[in-house]
Image (tube, grey):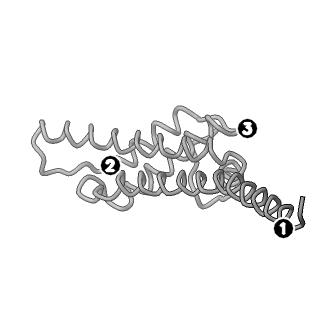
Amino acid sequence: MSMLSHIRKLLLCLAACLVIAAVPAMAEDDDDDRLDDAWEDAIGDQEPVLTDKQFALLNNLAFQAVAAKVCDGFTLDPDKFAAGIAEATSPAPDDLSDEDAETWKTAVLIRFGTSYGLLLAEGNDEDDEFCKNAKELKGDSEVPNVWQ
């Protein structure tokens, strides 16, 4: 076999290795993009349903609920969690009919569930980083938490 044949085989092997190594990296980027797109779809039109404060409070509650599910050392306190949900959903818009008020409550619960689901996906995908963030949040005395 000539030296040129050896070089061609080596280059072919290197190219194959690059393709094999690149596929998982591309898949990770696609996953990140899918979650970014999912978050955009989920929260892009939330403004008419929640105030900015309510939105932040519900996302914080969803994050803490997921940390209790995904991370060791985190347990939800049911009373604190219920109080947090009550705070995050008050005040409800006062100019709604009874039927519209029920629709609003449903929309808020769907919004919470959507955040919870997306955070579950993120937490399970990057649990070390997610749990590190949860520990930092738990140690921050300025952020109310609903853990025991």
Give percent across and percent down for residue 1.
Answer: 90, 58
Quickly name the residue at label 3. 73
Between tags 3 and 2, which lies in front? Answer: 3
Give percent across and percent down for residue 51.
Answer: 31, 59
- Toward the left, the furthest residue is 97
The mark nearer the N terminus, 1 or 2, is: 1
Quickly name the residue at label 2. 90
Q: Amino acid at mark 3?
A: Gly
Q: Residue at x 54, y 51 (%)?
A: 31
**SS for callout 3:** loop
- Toward the front, the furthest residue is 1
Q: Residue at x 32, y 59 (%)?
A: 44
* Crowding near the residue tagged with mark 1, few <14, some 14–19, many ≥20 C-alpha atoms within 10 Å: few
**SS for callout 1:** helix
Q: Is residue 135 left or right of residue 35?
A: right
Q: Is residue 133 above or below residue 2?
A: above
Quickly name the residue at label 1. 4
Between tags 3 and 1, which lies in front? Answer: 1
CA gap, disc 1 and disc 2: 75 Å
Q: Is residue 148 above or below residue 144?
A: above
Give percent across and percent down for residue 144.
Answer: 56, 53
Between tags 1 and 2, which lies in front? Answer: 1
Give percent across and percent down for residue 9.
Answer: 80, 58
Name the residue nearer the viewer: 134 or 140.
134
Q: Are marks 3 and 1 in contact (CB under 8 Å)?
A: no
Name the residue nearer the viewer: 72 or 96.
72
Q: Quadrant of residue 69?
A: top right
CA gap, disc 3 and disc 1: 60 Å
